[in-house]
Image (cartoon, grey):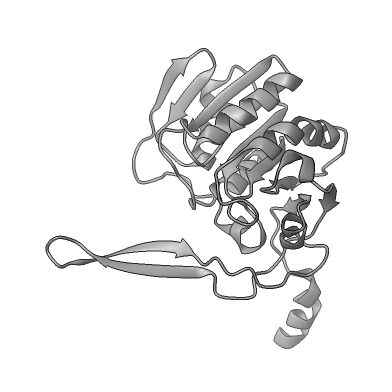
Amino acid sequence: MRILVTNDDGIHGPGLSVLEKIARAISDDVWVVAPDVERSGAGRSITLSHPLRYRHIDGRHYEVSGTPADCVVMATRKIMPGMPDLILSGVNRGQNVADDVTVSGTIAAAMEGTSLGIKSIALSQVLGIHNNGVTYAVAAAHGEAVVRKLLGFDFGAGNFMNVNFPDCRVDEVAGIDITTQGKREQNYMIVDERADNRGGSYFWLGFTRERGTHIAGTDLAAVFNKRISVTPLHSNLTQHVILENLKTHFA
């Protein structure tokens, strides 16, 4: 089995080495192609306005001067000797749940792989809910088993998996939940305005830390309950619930 490992935290992101170890426990044909710098929040953007470059680091490790989606395209069309059987994206530094999935570069790499017909899984390590430190212990301990279990499942066309590991001690993990994508209760984006040395304004975008309440069965509820969340996602964003009503409205 040939596996492509990528991420959005960049080639030096600590979660990337965790994911590579997971991949190497499954296969000896593992390729790592990741952005040269952090590209968090890049979504599924691809680079069209300037050329891309890639650099061979060593062995089967490469960095690309682009987004996570660029990395998947470059890996599959230029760098690798053939198409991978599996794409693993992550392990992201921080959760990709609820509204996060539409902006996440980690999710986007998996979505790009899915569009190419490759089984793809996004993996993220939750931070700041139960443990304020940065640790990938739960992902490292449970990642291989989760990936192996998913390898035995038929995703179907256009579908990929989003896995989030709770930020608790390994022995506190309460199990695995198959979940739906949650919804945050509040406007979770913040704009932090600051001033430079000349008095000019600049801004940092960030996220609120409010916990809120979470609907049972969602990815948010799972990680708050110290459970691993596995959410099937798909790239077709059609809202079928209102489709017929919309047709009637325009009739």
Residue found 77% across the figure and 85% down from its top: 248
Instruction: Give the quarter of the figure containing the C terminus.
Output: bottom right
Residue 120 occupies quadrant: top right
Measured as percent of width and height from the top left, residue 97 is found at 66, 57
Outermost residue, left side: 198
| Depth order, front residue of 244/171 | 171
Measured as percent of width and height from the top left, residue 3 is found at 67, 25
Q: Is residue 61 visible?
A: yes
Residue found 66% across the figure and 62% down from its top: 98
- Up/down of 220 relative to 56, above or below: below
Instruction: Give the quarter of the figure containing the N terminus.
Output: top right
- Up/down of 28 relative to 19, above or below: above
Measured as percent of width and height from the top left, residue 9 is found at 49, 40
Q: Is residue 1 visible?
A: no
Residue found 47% across the figure and 36% down from its top: 10
Residue 89 occupies quadrant: top right
- Up/down of 133 relative to 15, above or below: below
Residue found 53% across the figure and 28% down from its top: 33
Residue 112 occupies quadrant: top right
- Up/down of 61 relative to 154, above or below: above
Q: Is residue 54 left or right of residue 138?
A: left
Q: Is residue 118 left or right of residue 176?
A: left
Q: Is residue 199 left or right of residue 173?
A: left
